[in-house]
């Protein structure tokens, strides 16, 4: 029922964007991060990501996820706002 309501309210593109945004969840040590889906998410913003940016993005995401999962200072992160705050504090 919820999926039907979602389909009725949003276009296919909007639904896809929402699903890709869910991949940015910081819960469970970034468990839902999915590199391929995040790269596809970036494809919705062609003015922000050049072809070179997209090629490099995969490696950057791998490094980012490994670094954050291995750093105890980031284990309590629950939101994008708390991630940004922690990144500023830790430089």
Image (tube, rainbow, N blue to C red):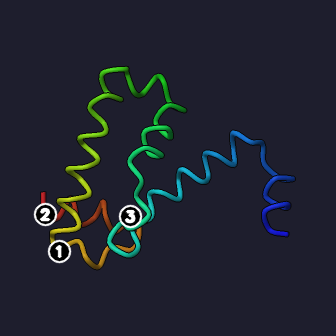
Which residue is depicted at the point 44% across and 57% down? 24
Marks 3 and 2, how far apart in space?
14 Å
Q: Position of residue 64 (x, y in %)?
A: 23, 53
Q: Secondary structure at mark 3?
A: helix
Which circle, 1 or 2, is nearer the viewer? 1
Where is mark 3, residue-wise? Answer: 81
- Disc nearer the start of the sequence (1/3): 1
Which residue is depicted at the point 15% across and 70% down? 71
Quarter of image, res 82: bottom left
Which residue is depicted at the point 80% across and 68% down? 2
- Disc nearer the start of the sequence (3/2): 3
Q: Secondary structure at mark 2?
A: helix
- Disc nearer the start of the sequence (1/2): 1
Which residue is depicted at the point 42% across and 39% down? 39
Is residue 48 depicted above or below 3 in this figure? above
Is residue 75 depicted above or below 9 in this figure? below
> Of residues 10 and 87, which is closer to you in this image?
10
Tag 1 near tag 3, CB within 8 Å? no
- Quadrant, the C terminus: bottom left
Marks 1 and 2, how far apart in space?
9 Å
Image disc number at residue 73: 1
Tag 1 near tag 2, CB within 8 Å? yes
Q: How many marks?
A: 3
């Amino acid at each position: 029922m919820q999926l039907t309501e979602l389909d009725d309210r949003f276009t296919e593109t909007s639904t896809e964007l929402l699903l890709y945004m869910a991949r940015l969840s910081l819960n469970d040590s970034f468990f839902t991060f999915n590199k391929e889906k995040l790269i596809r998410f970036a494809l919705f913003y062609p003015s922000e990501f050049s072809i070179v940016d997209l090629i490099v993005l995969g490696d950057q995401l791998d490094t980012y996820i490994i670094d954050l999962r291995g750093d105890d200072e980031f284990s309590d992160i629950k939101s994008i706002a708390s991630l940004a705050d922690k990144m500023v504090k830790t430089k």
